[in-house]
Amino acid sequence: MRKRSLRKSGQREKSGKKTILFVTAAFVVAVVVLTASAFRLFGDRTPPTPPRLAAAAYALIDINSGMTLHEHGQEQPLRLGSLTKLMAVYICFIELEGGTISLEDVVTISSNAAGKSGSIIDFGVGAQVSLDALIYSTLLASGNDAVTAISEFIFGDENTMVDQMNRMAAELGMKETRFTDCTGINSFDNRSTTRDLTLLVTEMLRRFPQITEYTVRSEMLISFLHEGVEYTRTLKNTNSLLDNTPGVYGLKTGTAQDSHNAIVLYEHGRRNYMAIVMNAPNDTTRWSSIRALLDYGVGL
């Protein structure tokens, strides 16, 4: 009986040693695999350090994969300014897709639209402008009169557009987003987060990639009729990176009470990035922050 017991004990000891050897080997293999993966990703260089920026919130997203590469303050609702207009344009493209309106439709500018303050195209009451030109005016030059005219054309009044904007935000899961106008003039009341804006822009690009055909232009000449006379306007894109950063193709800026925001789309090689900066203290910091995010993404 003693010998049999010793035999079993020896078997358990051998079995334990095999288990330890197996676990050790598995660990070594895992380390080798992870090391090889890291080498393939970074080679012999050090991974870049994520930037710390002088803005309340910011994010960098890999559009192709949907992966967030870096973010800060992502759940803090902040003033949108003219980033508000992105939701109105998104809804406009939904209506275009449904066939209820077309880009060739001619819109008459109301006194309400013409009377908007801040960033305007200055069409004049009664001017006749194509819907296509109004979209350019909204996305490039951030025209408050233009987006108001779009809203009134689709829904009959601005308030109905605002209601639809809030409903659409809820449908997209933008839980911290609130709109009180379609322009961003009510800068203290229109708020969102980088997380919510990522949801909106990702869905917008998925459904309507043609939107970037508008935002990739640094300027655009439009024409319209006012009291029987044809006028032209040269629209300048508020995205200052378009002229000096190859690969930038959108998307929108927003400024509200010294809160400088921007969403920038950038293509580098086969990768596409979305950089979002909210509540930067000034215009210079807005663009330096966007550049820092894009540089970080390219360096990964």
Image (cartoon, rainbow, N blue to C red):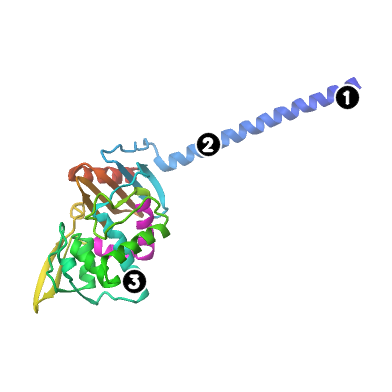
In the image, which residues are magenta? 196-216
First reached walking from the N terminus: tag 3 or tag 1: 1
- Tell me the tag on residue 4: 1
- Tell me the tag on residue 95: 3
Q: Position of residue 176 (x, y in %)?
A: 37, 50
The residue under label 1 is which amino acid type? Answer: Arg
In the rendered image of this protein, does residue 225 appear above or below residue 23? below
**Which residue is at the front of the view, 129 or 212?**
129
Residue displayed at 24% across by 77% down: 105
The secondary element bearing badge 2 is classed as helix
Give the label, 2 or 3, closer to the camera.
3
Q: Position of residue 264 (x, y in %)?
A: 28, 52
Residue displayed at 58% across by 33% down: 27
- Tell me the tag on residue 32: 2
The residue under label 3 is which amino acid type? Answer: Glu
For marks 2 and 3, give the CA distance.
Answer: 54 Å
The residue under label 2 is which amino acid type? Answer: Val
First reached walking from the N terminus: tag 2 or tag 3: 2
The secondary element bearing badge 1 is classed as helix
- Mark 3 is surrounded, within 10 Å at the Cα level, by few (under 14), some (14 to 19) or many (20 or more) other residues, namely some
- Mark 1 is surrounded, within 10 Å at the Cα level, by few (under 14), some (14 to 19) or many (20 or more) other residues, namely few
